[in-house]
Amino acid sequence: MNLSFENYIIRNFNDDDVDSLFKYANNINVSQYLRDSFPYPYSKQNALEWIYFIGQNNTNLAFAIADEHELIGGIGAMPNNDVHRLNAEIGFWLGEPFWNKGIMTKAVKVFCNYLFNSYNYNKLCANVFEGNEASKKVLLNTGFILEGTLRKNIFKNNKFLDQYIYGLLKEDFKR
């Protein structure tokens, strides 16, 4: 899969991504707003294992965000099942040197368009940790709306945090 926007691309992970994945993922400022399954510190071995895992079984639709030189982040969707089978949860991260440049907002728009059209999802959701104002802004700028708050629902770095749930319906999505 290749989705291009400006000078960036959303594509499959590959073996050449190990060094840049390690470089940008091994950052407390990145990992503090991600699930514990995204470890910190993030080792080169973690990068190798992730790329191998995704190459074997990409059921979570996980992809790299890259510029013309290297991987700079990641984006993915976790399909739901049963009565929620036409919904998916999206997640994303970006290396700190690329923050506040509008890259992720554009990536999320392109990715949502892909998910709505290729998988026929009716709704996409995203969960944001308390304090992650940048991700809230990305989602709002993409058309997501805040649908609810789960108070003190996250336990991260020995603290309880609120979890904000954002949703975007296919019928409300503006390409």
Image: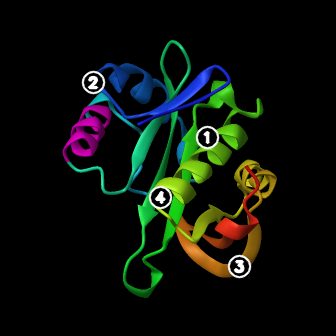
The dominant secondary structure in magenta is helix
Look at mark 4 in the image and give the residue it sits on.
Answer: 35
**Magenta segment range?**
46-56
Q: Residues within 10 Å of mark 4 (few under 14, many from 20)?
A: few
Residue situated furthest bottom in the rendering: 83
Look at mark 3 in the image and give the residue it sits on.
Answer: 149
Look at mark 1 in the image and give the residue it sits on.
Answer: 29
N-terminal-most mark, 2 or 4 = 2
Image position of 174 with respect to 49: above or below? below
Badge nearest the viewer, 2 or 1: 2
Answer with the quarter of the image where residue 171 lies.
bottom right
Compared across the picture, whether 132 is left or right of 158 comes to: right
At label 1, the amino acid type is: Asn
Look at mark 2 in the image and give the residue it sits on.
Answer: 15
146 or 152, which lies in front?
Answer: 146
From mark 2 to mark 4, how far is it between C-alphas? Answer: 24 Å
From mark 2 to mark 3, how far is it between C-alphas? Answer: 38 Å
Residue 107: x percent and y percent? 63, 39
Answer with the quarter of the image where residue 139 lies.
bottom right
Question: Could you say whether the residue bearing mark 4 is in a helix, strand or loop?
Answer: loop
